[in-house]
Structures are given as structure tokens and as C-alpha cells.
Image (spheres, rainbow, N blue to C red):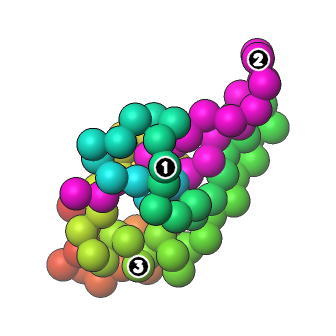
Amino acid sequence: MVKLRLKRCGRKQRAIYRIVAIDVRSRREGKDLRRVGFYDPMKNQTFLNVPLILYFLERGAQPTVTVQNLLKKAEVFKELPPNQMK
């Protein structure tokens, strides 16, 4: 199963997170399938590749709670068909 989750990057005390599509059995820093965005909590900045995120969500990828909150904030779920939403 594929999950959309955060992958930590950056340096000490200055974390930046990539939002990646990754196999559920992989480690947090493991090899990802695709990078679909990033999140900088210090600057409160988010970049999302919405078409790619929708591609993975339509094929059954499950976002983690944190990624789901970021997607709700960016209103990505409004672009999904009604039967795809949870």
C-alpha cells in the first residue's frame, strides 16, 4: 500500500519536510516513489503538486494525519470526486 507522508530534510533545528508517496513498509528516510510537495513549518510555507497528489489519492494512497491536515488546508479534497472522499 502507498502512503503520502512527510520525509524530514534540512539541518539540525531547521527541519523542512518533503511530502512523498512511499510504500508503507519503507522507513521514514527510505526510497520514495515520487515527491509530491514540501512543507516548511518555520516559514509556514507549503508547495503541493496537486495533479500528482490527486493521481495517488485516486489510486488508493492513504495520507497520514499530518499530510491530510495540510491537504485540507490547501483544499485539495474539494477537487476529488465525492465517492473518493473519506
CA gap, disc 2 and disc 3: 33 Å
Between 20 and 70, the one lying in front of the other is 20
Residue at which label 3 appears: 55
Q: Return the disc, 3 or 1, that comes first in the chain's sequence.
A: 1
Residue 52: image location, x then y, percent? 51, 76
Residue at which label 2 appears: 12
Tell me the residue at 27%/76% (across/down).
Answer: 59
**The residue under label 1 is which amino acid type?**
Lys
- The answer to whether the residues at label 2 and label 1 have Cβ atoms under 8 Å apart is no
Tell me the residue at 30%/77% (across/down).
Answer: 58
**Magenta stretch prevailing secondary structure:** strand
Can I make out residue 56 in this image? Answer: yes
Residue density around tag 1, few if under 14, some if 14–19, many if 20 or more, within 10 Å? few
**The residue under label 3 is which amino acid type?**
Tyr
Residue at which label 1 appears: 31
Q: Return the disc, 2 or 1, that comes first in the chain's sequence.
A: 2
User: Which of the 4 image quadrants contains residue 79?
Assistant: bottom left
User: Please, is residue 46 above or below residue 12 in the view?
Assistant: below
Secondary structure at badge 3 equals helix
User: Please, is residue 8 above or below residue 63 in the view?
Assistant: above
**The residue under label 2 is which amino acid type?**
Lys
Q: Quadrant of the C terminus?
A: bottom left
Secondary structure at badge 1 equals loop
Tell me the residue at 33%/52% (across/down).
Answer: 23
